[in-house]
Image: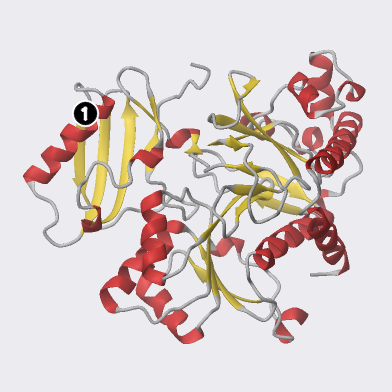
Amino acid sequence: MNARSLFYFYQLKKNLRLNLLSLQEMQQKRLRAIIKHAYENVPLYRRKFNSVGIKPEDIQSFADLSKVPVITKSEIQASSLEDVVARNVDVNRCLRRTTSGSTGLPLTVILDDRVLDFERAVWSLSFLERGLRLRDKMVVIADPRDFPKAKNSLLQRLRIMRREYISIFDDAQKTLTFLEEYKPEAIKGYPSVLMLLAEVCKHEGNAVKPRLIFTGAELLDNESRRSINSAFGIELLDNYASYEFGLLAWECHEHVGYHINVDGVTMEFIKGGESVVPGERGEIVCTSLVNYTMPLIRYKIGDLGIPSEEQCSCGRTLPLMKIVEGREGDFLVALNGRIIPPTIFSPYPFENFEGIRQFRIIQERRDELTIQLVVRGSFLGAQTLERAKREIQKVFGEGMHVKFQILENIPRDPSGKLRKVVSKIGVQWQD
């Protein structure tokens, strides 16, 4: 971290235990500033504000945010850089971060050094708050396109915040061999990759004994959490992040929920255009409080989550959200129109979930589900599949057509992620 990142780190650390009123005042002050900046410097937002007859001074609190129209990924994609980037910004001196595009066309977000330094501070604080030590070795299993460009930094040479990077596309046995030799104190990776490692560990014995495991990038279901925890003998800690906003929220050792990074983002949970009550599922709409280069205001991120009004016993006063339930394209629809969350498939509909190495559910039509399976040994038989089909039809409707595909492996998305549920039909959340 450089001097600016350290300054941000100090501010973030100080705000972890502020009282709720002080946190809200800080956040609303930053919100008013970014709203004013976007209106004055970004053509897209000036048009959006004018289209509904509002000015920046009309947005003084979180409640006023509902006056601002939401913005979608497709709107940003359809706009030129001149339309979405603030005036007088030299984009050639900024970082262009491109989203994975796992659910459609990729999106390019423009970030300057200040935003990148802030993101480094947020990630570093979250790790250190959860037990990572400065001299710990951490292995990051990720998309190789996201690996840092700089090598052999000063911190690395001083044996501080040491990181080794492994591609998610590497063979699980190869990855495990490296981990056994390197002996990291912490591992950060996709749940699907860690699940494969957990499976190898269970069958061959586990010589990898990290003190911490961090997950992210994919939906973490309960079965994956249990399997990874069991294989490595620890309680993993999940992160919720995005290409557009960096680290949004993180789980502490109390596992009460995810602490929201209110220093850098406002997060709304909406349904039918209105904020949901705590405990109710809603679409997540985010406003960046730090990206003045390419502001994202009331950006519909495409995920669904549950706000919480609980207080965590860890003493941190950051507001909480419950589990991120997946992207809109991860939710399925029953024949009667009922929306089915992806987390239902864990371990449903199979009694012996241990016999399944990988699975994916695809809904291409309202009345048809395809279940892709990679299984171990003689796990599957006609009776097993028939029982699973009946269980699925109990939930989705008796007329639901269910097809099974037994595969050698399930290919990852171009982003490297392995989505367990893929819906290709629209979900109407306002209903």
Residue 314 versus residue 163: which sits nearer the camera?
Answer: 314
**Residue 328, x across and y down, in percent:** 49, 33
Mark 1 residue type? Gln
The residue shown at (46%, 53%) is: 417
Residue 268 versus residue 142: which sits nearer the camera?
Answer: 268
The residue shown at (79%, 14%) is: 52
Disc 1: CA contacts within 10 A as few (<14), some (14-19) or many (>=20): some
| Residue 114 found in image quarter | bottom right
| Residue 69 found in image quarter | top right
In this figure, which residue is indicated by the disc labeled 1? 393
The residue shown at (19%, 61%) is: 376
Residue 424 versus residue 219: which sits nearer the camera?
Answer: 219
| Residue 109 found in image quarter | top right
Evaluate whether residue 171 shows in this view: no
Q: Is residue 191 above or below residue 309?
A: below
**Residue 363, x across and y down, in percent:** 33, 32
